[in-house]
Amino acid sequence: MQKFIVYITLIALLQSSLFGEVFSGLVLFSQSQGQGPSKTLLLNNFDQKVKIWDHTESTIGVPHLNTDGSIILQLKSSDHYFGNTRGPIGGVFKKLDYNGEIEWRFEFYNENYHPHHDFEILPNGNILTIGWEKKSLSEGINAGRLSIENEIWPLVIHEIKPLFDGDIEIIWKWHLWDHLIQDSDSSLNNYGIIKNHPELVDINIGNFTIPSEGDWLHTNAIAYNELLDQIIISSRHLNEIFIIDHSTTIEEASGHAGGNSNKGGDILYRWGNPINYGRGTINDQKLNAQHGANWIPQDFPGSGNIIMFNNNPSDATGGNNQFGNSSVVEIVPPIDNQGNYIVNDSLPFGPNNYEWVYGGDFTFFSQFQSGAYRLLNGNTIITSTQEKNIFEIDSLGNKVWEYDLELSGMQPGYTARAKKYGIDYLNNIMGDIYIDNQIDIYDFLMALEIFMLDEYLQKIDFNSDNQINQTDIDYMIGRILNTLMEPN
């Protein structure tokens, strides 16, 4: 009977709360620090730890949740050939089932390339990786780089198909090195007028993280748009995002023609810092050390727009980046009905300003990592990595949910970005919203929320009438009461 009283009390608290403003879903993120063990966590709106996966290696970036409850993640390799690199360096990929058993594992790195920071899962299950590609000092000089002391590590993107036995197949790849321009040496093949070629990247922009090493662009995010068959990448050092065509062949990706855009692997769109291609000044710069650029999915509020975390560190004189006024920004890319990006022959890519901004007033700040994702109900989930804080805001900017990682009881460390999945994302038994093979109070509380908001979830539509009504709620009550009243 005491359990039953607690149960009724929880229902009353739920009914009197503002919980309905929060998107009904599950939050997934990893938490890691250094080279040691790490964890991946699935969290519900009640801050209950629905599932924890333990890892012996340190996780990198953002894990991916599959509908069967399995996860795919990138982890740090035990060694690498890229000096005293800063930022997350990965190269080990795993798929774990809901119970933590390894379904497949592979390593993907060598002395010439190494994945880092982020990866993306394509609809066909293949994996997109961003990586450093090692070029020697002489190769850098011969490509027209002026300020260089040692190696240079441009971006390489691979599409990988896991073969489930530790082996892989490289399906597609793209090298930034094939799409460079410079205006310092007319004897080189990549010589040109920078402002006339925004589809190419000037090899002489941007500084190395460490001058004696090769981290040049510090690419920190990759995302995919299935509708456009395009890839977006984010460069912290260049304060700019780039979009390229994924529909090309490998050969076309190395050139300047082919694919849906008929531009090969050239840059289709770039935004954030037009001074990089000679069409702006410092006053036109809109991004500063940004992370987590991604498209808002189709049918979500803002569908097709691009959203990202603009870190905006501001203590440039001190060099420690410990102060700033971070924001989450959303832009509307200028794209026509044929999927072509619109740009004037002499002007920078638009838009001239943000479509929407949250923050920018010193209310939150992270000088590294971080990110934001739009949710189906119009809310936005934001990760401020340095502050170890995950929070959700509604369309008016009101904070409706928050999770403090310092108070979570988890291990020390940081989370790069948290994603939130709809409550009906996972496939499981009827009524078992949290795929723990039982129907309990937590399932019921979420079902009650869905009922109160007049929303629909097939997993709790027990009478199959395409609505969540009192019959469904009564069914869950009966199931839970029977469980509570069973003798211990």
Image (cartoon, rainbow, N blue to C red):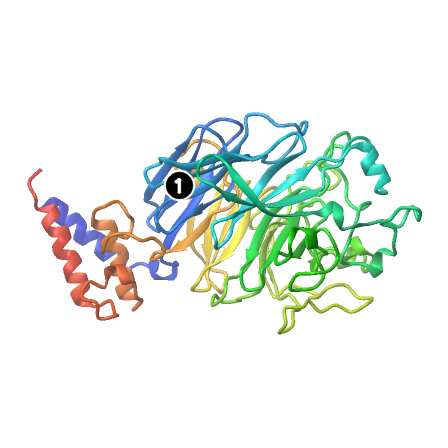
Q: Can residue 476 be seen in this view?
A: yes
Q: What element carries label 1?
A: strand
Res 85 quadrant in image? top right
- Please tell me how many numbered marks the rendered image carries: 1
Could you tell me residue 179's position as x and y percent?
76, 51
The residue under the point 28% across, 48% down is 435
Please, is residue 100 above or below residue 226 in the view? Answer: above
Using a 10 Å C-alpha cutoff, classify the residue at mark 1 as few (fewer than 14 neighbours), some (14 to 19) or many (20 or more): many
- x and y percentages locating residue 181 in the rendered image: 82, 50
Residue depicted at x 27% and y 65%? 452
Q: In this view, does 388 lie above or below 227?
A: above
Using the image as rendered, state which of residue 23 and residue 210 is in the foreground. Answer: 210
Q: Please tell me which residue lies in front, 487 or 328.
A: 487
Query: In the rendering, at what x and y percent does residue 139 appear?
Result: 81, 36
Picture coordinates of residue 186 (x, y %)? 93, 49
The residue tagged 1 is: 41
> Which of these two is toward me, 422 or 167?
167
From the viewer's perspective, is 83 left or right of 55? right
Residue in the foreground of this view, choosing between 376 and 315: 376
In the image, farthest residue toward the bottom: 337
Residue 367 visible from this viewpoint: no
Residue type, label 1: Leu
The image quadrant where one finds the C terminus is top left
